Amino acid sequence: MADYWKSHEKKYCEFCRCWFCVQFHESGEKHKENVRKRVDQVHIQIIPLVEKKQGFGRQREAKRKTNRPPSGARKKLDIHV
């Protein structure tokens, strides 16, 4: 019995949104450009979230500091109580 023909396994590229069976797809210029674009998109989406989270932490810290009386005033309150 003769050997039968078997195609290469196809893989799906999430960045290029295409199927490929050649192992050298990831080294191509189109693929590299699509990866750069995708990374930039994710970076643009994440930056506002990170800044919002950091800003919220700073606001919380500032609020915590403003609620405390100065250390000298606290000592005077402790003495008179």
Image: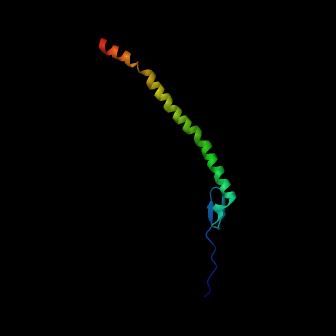
Task: Choose top left, top right, bottom left or bottom right for residue 13.
Answer: bottom right
Residue 78 as seen in the image, left or right of residue 49: left
So how many labels did they put on this image?
0
The foreground one among 44 and 29 is 29
Identify the image quadrant of the N terminus: bottom right
Residue 66 as seen in the image, left or right of residue 49: left
Percent of width and height locating residue 69 = 40, 18
Residue 81 visible, this angle: no
Asked if 11 appears above or below 50 in the picture, the reply is: below
The foreground one among 39 and 8 is 39
Residue closest to the far right: 30
Task: Choose top left, top right, bottom left or bottom right for residue 68.
Answer: top left
Residue closest to the far top: 80
Residue closest to the far front: 72
Percent of width and height locating residue 44 = 62, 42
The colour scheme of the drawn protein is rainbow
Q: Residue at x 65, y 51 (%)?
A: 36
Residue 53 visible, this angle: yes
Asked if 9 appears above or below 2 in the picture, the reply is: above
Q: Residue at x 60, y 46 (%)?
A: 42
Asked if 39 appears above or below 30 in the picture, the reply is: above
Identify the image quadrant of the C terminus: top left
Q: Residue at x 64, y 61 (%)?
A: 27
Asked if 11 appears above or below 73 in the picture, the reply is: below
Percent of width and height locating residue 45 = 61, 42
Percent of width and height locating residue 62 = 48, 26
The foreground one among 37 and 4 is 37
Residue 79 as seen in the image, left or right of residue 19: left
